[in-house]
Amino acid sequence: MTKNDVNRHSLLGKARRVVVKVGSAVVTTGHGLNPDAIERLARQLSELSDSGMDVVLVTSGAVAAGRQRIADNACKHGKDYKDMATRQAASAIGQGRLMHDYDEAFAAHGKVTAQMLLTRSGLKFRRRFLNARNTMERLLEWGVIPIVNENDTVSIRELEFGDNDTLGAMCLGLVGADLFINLTSADGVFDKNPENNPDAQSMPTIENICALDLESMCDGKTLVGTGGMYSKLRAARRAAQLGVPTFIVSGKGEFDIVAALESENKGTLVLPREHVVSSKKFWLAYHDDPAGSILVDRGAANALLTKGKSLLPIGISAVDGCFERGALVFIKTLEGEELGVGQSNFSADELIRIKGKHTDELASILGPLAFDEAVHRDNMLLDAAI
């Protein structure tokens, strides 16, 4: 048995808590929700639950369900769902139908479900994040299967997760999962886009996802909110940083999650990194959008990358953007290379005043300070998958 086989066969044996993300292409058709797919998914996840595993389901499909209800009732509506207000309205109509169908499908297997609608703005504050975690923990203690979706009706473009691949990755840190299964319309990951490259080869295992050029593999980034393989691989890269393996596999047709995990010919297994980040750093880096950039000189970049140092004002060469104290910011070199992200102890205006200054000069410029670091190493994540 090969190393890859051992990894696959041991996943279910080791996993005690799994997040399963299912995309619209799996649970919907051109006319609305796909009852066969929902029933199949409920049966298989119920089997995982019966085996003693905690299961969290992150699902798309509310907009498609809303479209179906609108069409069935001959409501007046636009010809497309491209604008945000229309999609949010369709989601508001469809969310209840989506949960109704899931609830009935899981109830047939003796399972209780709970709806959790999350927003990025709701999780960016640590206290709210911990409250959501406590709620999720209690549900899982009771043997309930939480069904998570983005709260589309109140999300705004600047704060929305953008796609449920991202939301699924965020849930890993929220619940402390040790396995991420991403059900999609594709038969795993290929080294090139198979739609444009007939010679594309499947990738059964990805050992070091950080070494891959995801944009070139996926023919560029997909648009926010459209999903696609780029967003799945970006989510897998985030999961790898948290020490969680990701299994990307087709959920179309007669899919079987357990059988796929036990087969070396199904899907793609993305292995976790050996050196993982803390759940706090993971939350800090990915629950908000960077509000600006701090550009550092080569000496500071080397200290950050090789010595694990905090970023001091003396190493800052320039500041981009307008942000307040506590904002999440990019940390870049002057050449534009992204080193990571971090939480700034100073506002953009303050950083402009103290950039390039020695630590003993700061108090004379800004007054008494409780800290010297521009970004503390405990509030920084290098090589972030933004």
Image (spheres, rainbow, N blue to C red):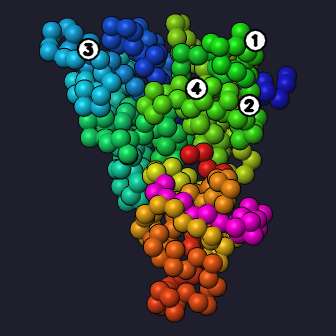
**Could you say where residue 217 lies in the image, as x and y percent from the top left?**
68, 27
- Mark 1 / mark 4, whichever is N-terminal: 1
Q: Amino acid at mark 2?
A: Ile
From the viewer's perspective, is the residue at label 2 or at label 1 nearer?
A: 1
**Looking at the rendered structure, which numbered label has been put on residue 79?**
3
Quadrant for the N terminus in the image: top right
From the viewer's perspective, is the residue at label 4 or at label 3 nearer?
A: 3
- Mark 3 / mark 1, whichever is N-terminal: 3
Q: Nearer the viewer, residue 77 or 365?
A: 365
> Callout 3: 10 Å neighbours few (<14), some, many (20+)?
few
Q: Measure the C-alpha gap from mark 2 to mark 4.
A: 14 Å
Q: Amino acid at mark 1?
A: Asp
Q: Residue furthest right?
A: 1
262 lies above or below 135: above
| Residue underneath mark 4 | 229
- Mark 3 / mark 2, whichever is N-terminal: 3
Q: Nearer the viewer, residue 156 or 141?
A: 156
- Mark 2 / mark 1, whichever is N-terminal: 1
| Residue underneath mark 1 | 199
**Could you say where residue 215 lies in the image, as x and y percent from the top left?**
64, 32
Q: Measure the C-alpha gap from mark 2 to mark 1.
A: 19 Å
| Residue underneath mark 2 | 206
Q: Over which residues does the magenta segment extend?
A: 290-308
The quarter holding residue 62 reads top left
